[in-house]
Amino acid sequence: MKTRWYKDAVVYQIYPRSFCDSNGDGIGDLRGIISKLDYIKGLGVDAVWLSPIYKSPNDDNGYDISDYRDIMDEFGTMSDFKELFDGLHSRGIKLIMDLVANHTSDEHYWFSESRKSVDNPYRDYYIWRKGRGKDGRKPPNNWTSSFGGSAWKYDETTKEWYLHLFSRKQPDLNWENPKVRKEIADICNFWMDMGVDGFRCDVITYISKKSGLPDGKFNLIFCGEEQYVVGPRYHEYIKELNAESWSKYDSFTVGEAAGITLSNAYDCIDESVAELDTVFSFEHLCVDMYFMVIPHRFSLTKFKKVLDSWQALPNTCQNTLFLENHDQPRSLGRFTGNYSGHRYEAATALAVAMQLQRGTPFVYQGQEIGMTNCRFTDDEYQDIMFRQIMNIVKYIPFGKSIARYCFSRRARDHARTPMQWNARENAGFSSAKPWMKVNPNYKFINVDKDLAEEKSIYKFYAKLHAYRKGNEAIIDGDYKDICPNNRNIFAYERKCGGKRLLVIVNFKNKAVKFNLPEEYANSKAELELSNYRGGGIFMPNMRLRPYEAAVYSLKSQG
Ligand code: GLC
Ligand code: CA
């Protein structure tokens, strides 16, 4: 039976490779996470989402799975997993796994069988086509991979091509094959029978491709998306998976939904449709990136417009509230501009602005101490996306310098630097040289230091999470942006029954005047939460300090 516990939950995302290394090989692991369970509990979160921990050759850090029922050697064993899992549950924290079902690793048994011959029983587990041109040496269509280059790879053995929307080592599964769908449901049931509480479904909107795999339209960078984002049989597949697996448990599913529109989202997350519980839309993260790749100026009004539109979904649709994950640059700086002198205020302002909207908040490891982007040389980037794209642009004049600039702002590596625990060597992440560069700012941005400070970002997050808990106006209340055109301030009302809250956040690193809209100007209000000591005075013409964030509860007019 679904209790929809996620409606009043906060989820903490862990990228295991970069969280904590317990055995000194420079790679984060499950026992590392186990050693930090009290830290996670202290943040007041209700669930943890673990990025993939399954067996994988790590072409894309675990998003290329070679065995869905076993743990990656570098991360530990199944018994470590069970201990982690019990440790979470005994602290009242649920566990969400990453379900990567659009593709497998090319080292998965299914694929090694599939590529052997055209009549192998696993052939139809993947998407194989003959090439174009006289000798079939041209890819079957013009689609591009999200990591750059053609989405097809020629395979000598059978002289056919297979589709890979990501790297060559991530062949796409053929969801038209009912056996594939059954395998995926079985995998979900395997983990849920063990007690896992749900799944974050990787690129789930890509699973149904238009039949005939028609050529796509080129935008500046990619080609083919309109042929597979929320494709023709998408809803059918998800409904089936829900019926065969998720609905049998008190589960929570969140779909990673690049390219999803508001109306698509309504069709797949409304409680009445029994598909996914919620989705990650990336529309608000495109405000400062064209095609999620090319950086440009951040505009608060555009940002609010997108978020407001998602808030307008009916209460039977649950939103997600997030600014970071393992694929995104860090939010400090990105959405705050230069925050010098006000790191704490800027980080907490973002937390308030996001978390008090209607939806399930997600906090990404390190966000709770204000970790930032890092500077990398070409050799220091680890992500396949960087390597692959650099390889392609080297043939274009200025290609490398343009790409370098884009990656300096956009690279996924920014989120993947090791967690900064303390000011000791390797930031306390590992006793050995970490797999990935540590951000040199760990000496002054780290957990120990943050916790010792009066202005602790972690403690503010914990307070905010406690404030949200059971707060009906926040969980279920109506949402209204009270100044959508204001370029400095994000302010909204939340209302439920007689309870009315005003959330007011200054996004600028300077004092800003704010004239309350008339309808509130004569209200009386009480301060409920603030990121300033001696916080805020409620009056018709307010003056907000740099990154000041305040929540007022409105008293009846008088
Ligand atoms: C998702 C993951 C990303 C991965 C891709 C392919 O976008 O978040 O890290 O590279 O899917 O699995
Ligand atoms: Ca390790």
Image: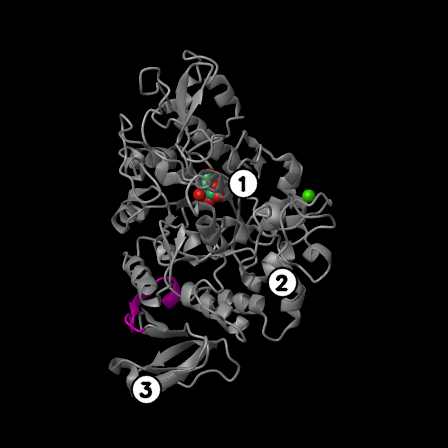
CA distance separating discs 1 and 2: 27 Å
Residue 357 visible in the shown view: yes
Camera-nearest residue between 382 and 35: 382
The residue labelled by disc 2 is: 441
Please identify the quarter of the rendering in which residue 520 is found: bottom left
Q: Where's residue 280, x and y in %?
A: 39, 50
Name the residue type under label 1: Pro
In the picture, the disc for residue 52 is 1
Residue 127 in the image, given as x and y percentages of width and height: 38, 24
Residue 482 among those drawn in magenta: yes
Where is residue 390 shown, x and y percent of the image? Answer: 48, 42
Q: Are marks 1 and 3 in contact (CB under 8 Å)?
A: no
Q: Which residues are magenta?
A: 472-486
Q: Quadrant of the C terminus?
A: bottom left
Q: Amino acid at mark 3?
A: Pro
Q: Quadrant of ligand 2?
A: top right
Relative placement, left or right, of 197 versus 213 is right
Q: Which one is earlier in the sequence, the residue at label 1 or at label 3?
A: 1
Direction front: furthest residue: 397
In the rendered view, does 92 fall on the left or right side of 288? right
Using the image, determine if residue 322 lies above or below residue 394.
Answer: below
> Tag 3's secondary structure?
loop
Secondary element under disc 2, as helix, strand or loop, is helix
Answer above or below: position of 142 versus 314: above
Of labels 3 and 2, earlier in sequence is 2
Q: How many marks?
A: 3
Mark 2 neighbour class, 10 Å CA radius: few under 14, some 14 to 19, many 20 or more: some
User: Crowding near pointer 3: few (<14 within 10 Å), some, many (20+)?
Assistant: some
Residue at 68% across / 53% down in the picture? 429
> Label for residue 540?
3
